[in-house]
Image (cartoon, grey):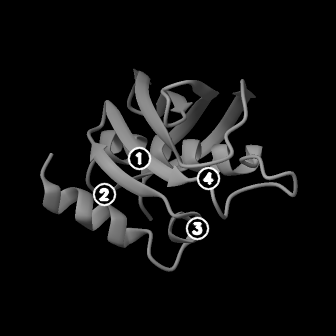
Amino acid sequence: MTQELVALMNEAGNGHLPERMGIEFIEATAHRVVARMPVQGNTQPYGLLHGGASVVLAETIGSTAAAMHAGAGRIAVGIEISATHHRSATTGHVTGVATQLHGGRTIATYEIVITDDQDRRVCTSRLTCMLRDAS
């Protein structure tokens, strides 16, 4: 993976939800995608990282990995996501790492682990994407 690819992935989110959430890709392959997101601006009224923000990060990086696995002329569509929130985050960034659990022709599944700046697990998510031809 080249820095040019990461730059293109970050640009692809411009004008869309990943940009609004401040998601920044760090590395990406079909088997592993890493990105980070600021806590500030993605909190609930109590000042804690919003659980929905963690799910947005998880689906963004898992779907990206699935699309890379699907290959040219194909797309990945999320069909199921789950998330367990282990602890809160109030400052800094959280980092998500999506790791492929299954990569088939029609389905790809990823585990996404989100940690805080102290490398403590904030959330564990699992995403399954359907892979199909682009129409």
Tag 2 near tag 1, CB within 8 Å: no
Other residues around mark 4 within 10 Å, as few (<14) / some (14–19) / many (≥20): many
Q: Residue at x 26, y 39 (%)?
A: 29
Q: Disc 1 residue type?
A: Ala
- What is the secondary structure assignment of the residue under circle 3? helix
Frontmost residue, 67 versus 119: 119
* Residue 63 spot, x, y in % from top left: 48, 46
The tag on residue 35 is: 1
Frontmost residue, 8 versus 46: 46
Mark 1 / mark 3, whichever is N-terminal: 3
The tag on residue 87 is: none
- Label 4 vs label 3: CA separation? 15 Å
Q: Residue furthest right?
A: 45
Q: Residue at x 35, y 65 (%)?
A: 10
Other residues around mark 2 within 10 Å, as few (<14) / some (14–19) / many (≥20): few
Residue at the spot of label 3: 17
Q: Residue at x 73, y 26 (%)?
A: 84
| Quarter of the image where the C terminus is located | bottom left
Mark 4 / mark 2, whichever is N-terminal: 4
Q: Is residue 87 above or below residue 26?
A: above
Q: Disc 3 residue type?
A: Leu
Residue at the spot of label 4: 39
Mark 2 / mark 3, whichever is N-terminal: 3
Frontmost residue, 46 versus 80: 46
